Amino acid sequence: MEPGIAQRLLVATREYLAGFEDATLAGFLSGVNWSMDERTLPAKPLPCLHWLDRIYFMAAGDGREIARLLSENRNGLHWGQTYTEADFGRRFIENYGWLELFGTRGHFANNEMAGGFLILGPHIQYPDHHHTAEEIYIPLTGGTGWRKDGGPYVERPAGAVIHHPSNVGHAMKTSAEPLLALYLWRGGPLAARSTITGKAETI
Ligand SMILES: [Fe+2]
């Protein structure tokens, strides 16, 4: 792993977010204190990380540096899973994982906002769920369908800013390609488990 990888990832994430002109995102970021204390966390790889090869190949533009840092240093970072096989089945668990870059338990300490990255493999549905925290997702790869409040799945391109207000249900469904998405959470318990209302489908 490159030395200072978490710090480099934080800088790349901050620079990536600074490139957007989006009022909701600007509101989220206005209160962020980027001088966060780094935690020493053990490496914790997951089975889904092999998708980072394809994700790095797919990632373009401003998101490519984040994809590169994640891909090249995947085995040194502290990845996590909120769900278990009992929730959505084994295939989901082998194709799902997240990295909390900052937050109450991530590589950097922040009690006001959590931010990090979600990976889903191809043909995976993350069923409808909701949580108290308000959330922004920005996919760094295209091809995933996103839905909000029980509406239809809409394919969103890389760089789309997707906002989920507090307790509004949402779901994602990948197709032929894996997903890498940046997430931001604020205004709720930052390590809370989502309430699941949907069921995993075989797709
Ligand atoms: Fe969410």
Image (cartoon, grey):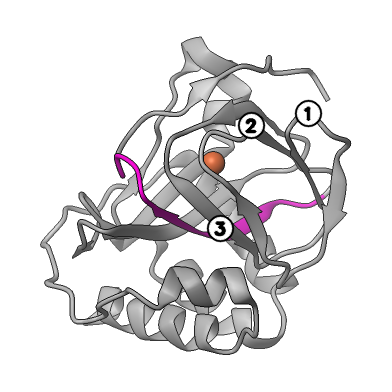
Label for residue 150? 1
**Residue 194 sits above or below residue 118 on the image:** above
> Callout 1, which amino acid?
Gly
The quarter holding residue 94 reads top right
State the CA–CA distance, disc 3 to disc 1: 18 Å
Label for residue 198? none
Mark 2 and mark 3 lie on one chain; the one further toward the N terminus is 3
Residue denoted by label 3: 136
State the CA–CA distance, disc 2 to disc 3: 13 Å
Q: How many marks?
A: 3
Q: Is residue 203 magenta?
A: no
Q: Nearer the viewer, residue 140 or 166?
A: 166
Badge 2 marks a residue whose secondary structure is loop
The quarter holding residue 112 reads bottom left
In the image, residue 20 lies at what x, y percent? Answer: 62, 84
**Residue 172 sits above or below residue 180 on the image:** above
